[in-house]
Amino acid sequence: MKTLSNILISHLFFLSLFGLATYAFAEEDTAVEAEATISAEATIETTPEERPAGTEAVREKIQEREAISEERQAEREANQEERVETRESLAEERQIIRDERRVVLQAEAQARITNLAANISNRIDAAIVRMQNIIDRIETRIDKLEERGVDTSAAASALAEAQISVDAAKLSVANIDAEVALALSSEDVRSTWSTVKTSFGTIRDLLKDAHANLRVCVSELKKAVTEFQEDYVAAEAELEAATSE
């Protein structure tokens, strides 16, 4: 019986301790919750002095972001302007290069045309001199044959036509230098060169006509001499026959 009482007393003692511990823990939790609530309220309900300081910090952050954004925008615009200026600069450089190349080509074309015109003029001058010498020799031959009684009228006519063509060629050559100078002073040398080529072609045709008339002249002169010789032989035969009778 005594043992049972001791057991009951022990159980009551432990139950009392457990109750006291539970109460202590409950009070501690309540205190923690109260502190958390007070801390939250303190965080939310700032003083009038603290509130502007937080707003100013936010405003500064916003202004900082806006400044960064404006700086980046300005940088993009500057890069865009730089790219535009670079393209314009490259275009100007390309135009300068084209202009310089055009000047070089113009100078090269002028040099080639000058040399070509000089070579053609020299050949034409030589051809005119050579043809004039032939005309002079044939003219002397015609005069001698006329003195001997040869009929050289056809040959003399062809020779006169040859002389007309040669004289026209001489006149054209005298003006060709001025035409070449005019072509070289033009901005488009290649197009104005066609006029000079036309003049050279005209001179060439005149010399061809002169050469053709000289061939006719020589042919007529040979024919006249042959006829004269035949007439002379026939005349001698008649004279010999008449004297032998």
Image (cartoon, rainbow, N blue to C red):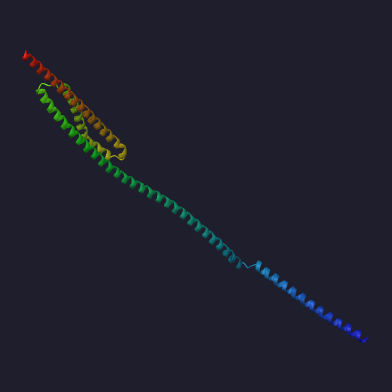
Q: Residue 134: x, y in percent?
A: 16, 31
> What residue is at 91 percent from the left and 86 percent from the top?
3
Q: Residue at x 68, y 68 (%)?
A: 40
- The x, y position of residue 4, in whole percent, is 91, 84
Up/down of 16 relative to 44, above or below: below
Residue 200 visible in the shown view: yes
Q: Residue furthest front?
A: 244
Left or right, 71 with respect to 134, comes to right
- Asked where in the image residue 202 lies, by quadrant, the reply is top left
Res. 147 image quadrant: top left
Q: In the rendering, at what x and y percent does residue 163 appear?
A: 18, 28
Decide which of 201, 214 is in the foreground and name it.
214
Of all residues, the one furthest to the top in this rendering is 245
Q: Is residue 174 above or below residue 145?
A: below
Image quarter (top left, top right, bottom left or bottom right) of the N terminus? bottom right
Classify 77 as above or below 119.
Answer: below
Q: Is residue 177 visible?
A: no
In the figure, 35 relative to 87: above or below? below
Q: Nearer the viewer, residue 15 or 131?
A: 131
Q: In the figure, is residue 197 to the left or right of 65?
A: left
Whether residue 28 sits left or right of residue 12 in the image: it is left
Q: Residue at x 10, y 25 (%)?
A: 144
Q: Locate residue 58 relative to residue 39 in the image: left or right.
A: left
